[in-house]
């Protein structure tokens, strides 16, 4: 399947000027930062505040799942065309991204949602004039939960209203043309069964959504960790030279992203979590217990907000495997 954005005479304009246009680093009045990956791939980054700068008593689902760990969205741009990969937890954040792109001459947008979790789709309504693509599974989840998303009962406030469900659902790899550039949208069962990563073959860049994170992955679906482990191995074989996750260290993202060591770290983490799920002290084991080599090597670093995520991971894995035999993992 191939999706082609509308072409225009402006398609080649402004590319050489893009690096200069990133000067200043912020969009609007908030902390969203613009991080150029190259002359046609742009990261927009928000969040990751210091621990002593937040009030946990006032934190929402958007803070715990995205803003505290740091959240990036991406755009592939050629002249007047752009593919936007994810739309932030809120319309306010998404509006800053769209405004920045429009000021640089973009008039035609297409959006890809990496999966159905709300911190990736919250700004969809801002693209009412554009096509939004997700996997069939993500679209089904969002249709099923639309009313609860809009009234704030799904995960609590803030509600996302109005909410736009993706119009296009895919189940097979789909090629999108953005001017001179090709983006392959590839469904994957990693992190969640409805995942969709974006592969840029001309750059060998991988926009990874939540399939990979620094410090560690949120284990959303413990029942499929064996399959996720295998799928991560397949993804590594694609040979990405740069990996751009939605939640990671902005300094590493700004330098072009992570290496495939991030994939191996994620495999080691989920495998070790499962293999130790029956340990008597499993509920109290630290992040450092599971990925010591990767922390020592600097593949990832411990960001404070991921300690809560790790604690939740321990609870989910322990509950799922409580009365089940532990699976064996292939090498």
Image: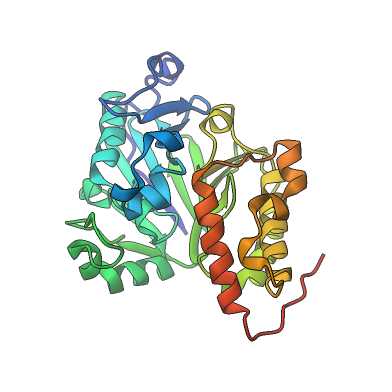
Q: Nearer the viewer, residue 272 or 90?
A: 272
Q: Is residue 2 above or below residue 255?
A: below
Asked if residue 189 can be seen in this view, the reply is no
Q: Quadrant of residue 49?
A: top left
Q: Is residue 3 above or below residue 41?
A: below
Percent coordinates x, y for residue 24 in the rendering = 37, 15
Q: How is the image coloured?
A: rainbow
Q: Nearer the viewer, residue 118 or 317?
A: 317
Percent coordinates x, y for residue 160 in the rendering = 22, 56
Asked if residue 180 can be seen in this view, the reply is yes
Please state, as top left, top right, bottom left or bottom right, where the C terminus lies in the image. Answer: bottom right
- Residue drawn at (40%, 66%) of the image: 138
Q: Quadrant of residue 302?
A: top right
Q: Is residue 194 above or below residue 82?
A: below
Percent coordinates x, y for residue 87 in the rendering = 34, 46
- The residue most toward the bottom is 323
| 292 relative to 143 in the view: left or right | right
Q: Nearer the viewer, residue 305 or 5?
A: 305
| 255 relative to 291 in the view: left or right | left
Query: How many numbered tags mark residues here?
Result: 0
Percent coordinates x, y for residue 258 in the rendering = 63, 38
Q: Is residue 103 above or below residue 290?
A: above
| 32 relative to 188 in the view: left or right | left
């Amino acid at each position: 399947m191939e999706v082609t954005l509308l072409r225009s005479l402006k398609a080649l304009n402004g590319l050489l000027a893009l690096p200069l246009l990133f000067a200043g680093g912020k969009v609007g009045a908030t902390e969203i930062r613009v991080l150029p990956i190259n002359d046609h791939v742009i990261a927009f980054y928000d969040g990751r505040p210091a621990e002593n700068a937040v009030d946990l008593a006032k934190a929402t689902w958007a803070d715990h799942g995205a803003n505290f760990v740091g959240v990036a969205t991406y755009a592939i741009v050629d002249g007047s065309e752009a593919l936007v990969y994810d739309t932030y937890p809120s319309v306010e954040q998404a509006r800053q991204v769209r405004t920045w792109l429009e000021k640089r001459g973009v008039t035609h947008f297409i959006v890809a949602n990496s999966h159905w979790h709300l911190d990736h789709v919250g700004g969809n309504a801002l693209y009412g004039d554009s096509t939004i693509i997700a996997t069939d599974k993500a679209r089904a989840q969002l249709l099923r939960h639309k009313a609860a998303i809009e009234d704030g009962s799904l995960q609590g406030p803030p509600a996302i209203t109005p909410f736009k469900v993706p119009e296009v659902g895919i189940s097979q790899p789909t090629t999108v043309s953005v001017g001179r550039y090709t983006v392959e949208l590839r469904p994957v069962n990693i992190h969640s069964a409805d995942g969709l990563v974006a592969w840029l073959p001309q750059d060998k860049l991988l926009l990874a959504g939540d399939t990979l994170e620094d410090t560690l992955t949120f284990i959303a679906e413990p029942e499929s960790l064996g399959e996720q482990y295998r799928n991560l191995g397949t993804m590594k074989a694609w040979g990405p030279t740069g990996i751009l996750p939605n939640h990671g260290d902005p300094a590493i993202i700004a330098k072009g992203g992570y290496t495939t060591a991030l994939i191996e770290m994620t495999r080691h983490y989920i495998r070790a979590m499962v293999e130790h799920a029956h340990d008597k002290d499993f509920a109290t084991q630290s992040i450092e217990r599971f990925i010591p080599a990767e922390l020592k090597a600097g593949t990832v670093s411990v960001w404070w907000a991921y300690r809560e995520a790790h604690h939740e991971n321990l609870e989910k894995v322990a509950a799922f495997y409580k009365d089940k035999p532990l699976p064996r993992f292939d090498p």
